[in-house]
Amino acid sequence: MFFVKSSFYFLWAIFAATSFFAASCITRDDAVVTESHEFKHSEKKYRAIIKEKTKKATLYVDFETRVKVGVVHLDEQLMGTVKNRAIENYGVDKISALLGPMNSGEKVFLISVFSKSWDDDLKGSPNWHIELDQSNQKFAPKDITRLNQKDFLASFFDSVDNWSTEYLLRFDVSGDNQLESGPFALKVSHTDGRVIVGW
């Protein structure tokens, strides 16, 4: 009888110690995650705006993913929200310094690109062609800038991932052929095919 009781208490002690250790590990891990991703800005409201401004498309060839793009329309409303988020969480507006000025008469987009051929260089590559299209009007980008600081961008835009390459696209839509109010589309063509995203 003594042996049975001793064995019971011994096993109970091991179980309690193991449970405490496991709980401690989980608590520490959760604390790290929370500290790394906690934002003061209303997450739900921010994600709703980002979702509205972001369009994604995937090109499949023979059931294989060949090209994926995620495009964010950086209009005045979105940039105001993004700036507020940057200031609230980093103390300064780092995002404007990275993306540059948003000038009137321009349409600006953040594009994340993945290509199965690993040819993600949009700038100067003959394999890529990009145009902004509205009715019969077509606009070529006046500037394509490759962006760094992927981790920083990912904290604002969910189109950024580990396999994508990010660029800033600027289109001049002023002057005689200015873009009218209404729907427009961004067409991204590759040697494998073309994807179209619209707003």
Image: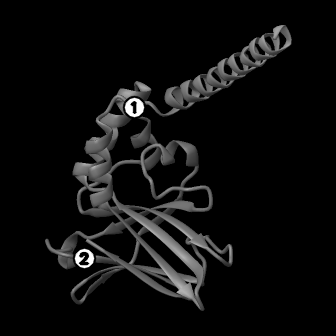
Residues packed near mark 1 inside 10 Å, few (<14), some (14 to 19) or many (20 plus): some
Q: Is residue 103 above or below residue 14?
A: below
Observer able to see residue 42: yes
Q: Which residue is mark 2?
A: 184
Q: Secondary structure at mark 1?
A: loop
Image quadrant in which the N terminus is located: top right
Kindly identify the residue that appears in the image at 58 percent across and 75 percent down: 124
Judge by depth and name the residue closer to the eye, 8 or 65.
8
| Residue type, label 2 | Phe
Kindly identify the residue that appears in the image at 27 percent across and 59 percent down: 52
Q: Earlier along the polypeptide chain: callout 1 or callout 2?
A: 1
Q: Which residue is mark 1?
A: 39
Residues packed near mark 2 inside 10 Å, few (<14), some (14 to 19) or many (20 plus): some
> In screen coordinates, is 24 left or right of 110?
right
Nearer to us of marks 1 and 2 is 1
C-alpha separation, residue under disc 1 versus residue under disc 2: 33 Å
Judge by depth and name the residue closer to the eye, 125 or 196.
196
